[in-house]
Image (cartoon, rainbow, N blue to C red):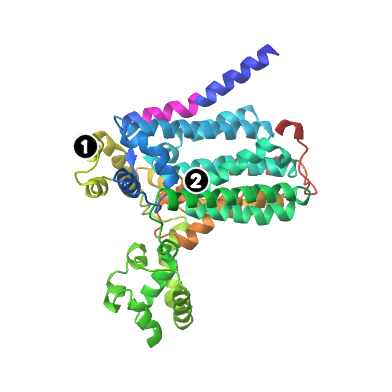
Amino acid sequence: MKLVSQRKNLDSLTILLLMLVPNLLWLCVVYPGYLQADHQISIASFALGHPREWHSLLWCLFAFPFLYWSPSIAVYGVVQIVAYVALMMFSIKRLQRIDIIKRRGGFILATVYGFFPTFVAYNQLYSSDVMFAYILVPITVMLMEVYKTSGECLKSIKFSAFFCLFMYLACELRKNAILIPVIAACVLLLIYKPVRKRLAALFAVLLASLLATSVFFSVVLQSEASPSQEMLSVPAMQIARVYVDDGDIPDSVRKDLEQVRSADDWKSNYVDYLADYEKKGLTLSATFIKDWLILGLRNPSSYIQAYQDLMYPYWQLTVGDDRVSIDFQNHDDFTIGTCGNQCRAEYVSQFKRNKQPSSARLLEMIRIANEEHYPFVNDFYNLIICNRALPLWVIIFGFVVAGIRGRLKAFIVVAIPLFSVVLSLICFSPIAFMRYSMQAYYMIPVMILFLVYLFRKESKEDGKPLPVQVQLYR
């Protein structure tokens, strides 16, 4: 018994070191790491007493002392890496506990999360997007537990509390995460009828927590709310494309739209892969929706073309331009321009990247992978490391595998977070950044292992989950 305990402790230490050491070493290589451009504005604005909800204010409250008051922003980098390792260890241990993976599978998963270039690189990007990506992994794993126990694990207060907490954090870190509890509520309430009351209570607590947080931010902190234009990337681009194509625009619609900007500006601002310029100043209203629908009925080809041009990297596997480097470039003007002379000088000075040339090393590696024609390097980089279409194709492949094994219900339950993120990207993304697709990347390893688990079962089952002792969750 003592030997078994010692081996488990040694396994846990090995898993921890496999993930922690490579990420800390890479932080030393790219010291002090990278504070994402938009999040620089969030931190600077908060320092000036103007909290904003354009990006996660909860993340800002958490990260602010580590970024602003510490000797280096790298202090937050260490905190983010520790959070990453803790959440991945939580996920690996639970996967082993419910027999999705064995001891060797834990080592393989830890090696992937410790050494895979996408994860190692983005773990040094300080933003709510990255923390959001971390949180999605334990949510996915806990949904595997829900499936394996036929929902019985939800009777455990401890399990339900963690599940609710992770979904709350996800929703606060990224607004598009609201699709996760919405879809989860629909799917789980439909499938797991014996625990409907517990599910209803869980989602009610989640909703109340989100509403309470929103009231706290708006009333107590007097934060600047995120404008509705953030949801209008696709409609804005479609409208602009009609102007570019000299399409059919009724006078009543033209009058409404040209109160926002002139016809020439609708045309000249149009960049087919970027919606930021076109959505600026728009508000979600009944008039806007009506005008958008009228214009779409008269100009369907322009609408389709605008959508394809904006979103195609999310489904086309062979896109060469990954738009990764922009996340790791020098955006010191976002901090210096926002702060002026009013922020802490020691904080602002860190964004003069010429003082820290080590941070340019990753950019050089990205350039080499993208532009140099070394055998296999470019293909591996574009197809595996930074492929924005990969999450969607994992979903498609997963449906095929689950269908073959007669486990579609299992895959539907487990894939809720992955599906929700991909759906939000192809509906609302203002640009097909790898930083957005990366949110789904961290779920891919556990999803692949789950598909391996489904495929390796010797015979199809009747849809009932494999037995797991409910006492494990008490």
Q: Give, as a single range, the part of the protein colored magenta.
A: 17-26
Give the residue displayed 32% in from the left and 34% down from the top. Answer: 73
Q: Nearer the viewer, residue 304 or 430?
A: 430
Which numbered marker is on residue 24? none
Is residue 236 toward the left or the right of residue 104 in the image? left
Q: Earlier in the sequence, mark 1 or mark 2?
A: 1
- Residue 25 belongs to magenta span: yes
Q: Is residue 307 magenta?
A: no
Instruction: Left or right? Give the position of 406 relative to 19.
Output: right
* Residue extending furthest toward the bottom: 251
Query: Mainly helix, strand or loop, the magenta region?
Result: helix
Badge 1 vs badge 2, beta-carbon distance below 8 Å: no
Q: Where is residue 8 in the image (x, y as percent from the top left)?
A: 62, 20
Distance of mark 1 from mark 2, alpha carbons? 36 Å
Q: Quadrant of the N terminus?
A: top right
Task: Identify which residue is drawn at 68% across, 37% down.
Answer: 157
Across and down, in percent, residue 298 comes to: 46, 83
Of the residues shown, which amino acid type is indicated by label 2? Tyr
Which quarter of the rendered picture does the C terminus lie within? top right
Specify the amino acid type for callout 1: Ala
Q: Position of residue 85 (x, y in %)?
A: 49, 31
Residue 29 screen position, x and y as percent: 32, 30
Residue 441, numbered label: 2
The residue that label 1 is drawn on is: 345
